[in-house]
Amino acid sequence: MKIEIEYEASWRNSFLDGDNNEALPNKGRKFIGSITALKKGENHITRDVTMNTVMGILNRLIGEQRKLYQVREDTAYYFKDIEPLVSFQDDVKVKNTELVYLRNMSGNTDQNSFTGMIKTDDKMFTSDYSKEFWSVLALEVDELLEFIIHGREMTQNIVLDPLVISDKFVAIGKLKALDEDENILTTLAILEKKFDGTNYKNNKDKVVPLNLYCSALYLQLERLSSQYDLSSALTKSGTIAGISKRLFTKKDFMNRFTTGEKKKIFGNPYIAKSFVKGEGQVTSMLTKASGVLEIIIDIGRHEAKALKMIIENAGVSSFYLGKKGLAYVTNIDTREVK
């Protein structure tokens, strides 16, 4: 018996982790098609037609609505004895890549955006400690090292405004990584002793300035605590909102100073970039395929006619082959394949 299926624009990528042939986790399968997730090469997943794909199609054609793993667990599974007799041939006629935008409904928020009006009169910017605290960000890198090592007095000026502070962090984040010298080593020794477990280097073993500035703010908090009440600068957990010992997150920082909620992300282009030895940077997008899928079932003609009747009675006109696209049966031949 042979079933011919034509398909067009079948999506050949997966945007969820886990396996569709296993029971769903309590919180569902995780969306890995976001810009952030696609920075990891393993999250750009390609898919081809497999035996599970074929068995899912056959079950769909007889009117089965359950997932394949659920059907296989049923004692009355129609293809229980037939499945070992199934083979297939996927003849791809056209295969191309396209740029598509995915709609993410999981409620993720934009790392670098916010909504609403900005409140500049927050106590973090109007308290007696504010100028000395935020002036750390006005230091040049060599001045910052001196501040961390010797605890120098703050004389620099910085505009006490959340947007100015946020932009300053962005500028600091673009500073070139530092090679180790005597001052750097002394600085790292002080910070690593004070903030155990904090990493200040990138994957090239160079020191990241942003990490030093973030830790320096916490160091300044500690130094000012003997003079001022700093409770208004901290969250309930004792941290600075949006600022860890080594990183700055704009959305979390601005959330305190804006009247609106964090800006949600509703979609992004599906693009993954990677470096391949000998080729350089490779850009991967969504793959779509069109062609003909031949499903061959090694059963007798009487059994084949019975299966054909079930398929015709189910009346499934079109369906997805894998992810999206359009697929439909063009021919069912009940003769035994020789």
Image: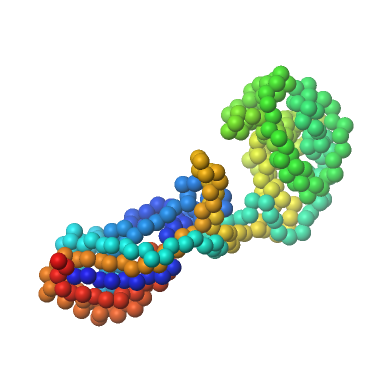
Res 73 quadrant in image: bottom left
Question: Which quarter of the figure is the N terminus placed in?
Answer: bottom left
Q: Where is residue 19 in the image (x, y as percent from the top left)?
A: 37, 54
Residue 323 found in image quarter: bottom left
Residue 321: % across, % down: 37, 66
298 or 36: nearer the eye?
Answer: 298
Where residue 203 sits in the image (x, y, percent)?
58, 33
| Residue found 46% across the figure and 60% down from its top | 287
Q: For this rendering, which residue is in front, 205 or 212?
A: 205
Q: Which residue is drawn at 18% across and 59% down?
A: 84
Query: Taking 78 as reference, is 167 left or right?
Result: right
Which quadrant of the figure has residue 8?
bottom left
Residue at coordinates 46% horizontally, 47% vertically from top-left? 42
Residue 218 seen:
no
- Number of numbered discs on residues: 0
On the question of residue 264 being in view, the answer is yes
Left-right relation of 207 to 131: left
Residue found 26% across the figure and 73% down from its top: 62
Q: Position of residue 310 (x, y in %)?
A: 22, 77
- Indicate the quadrant containing the C terminus: top left, top right, bottom left or bottom right: bottom left
In this orientation, which residue lies closer to the viewer: 300 or 244? 300
191 to 249, vertically: above or below: above
Q: In this view, does 211 lie above or below 253?
A: above
Q: As displayed, is residue 242 above or below residue 199?
A: below
Q: Is residue 55 left or right of residue 318?
A: left
The residue lying toward the viewer, choosing from 69 and 133, is 69
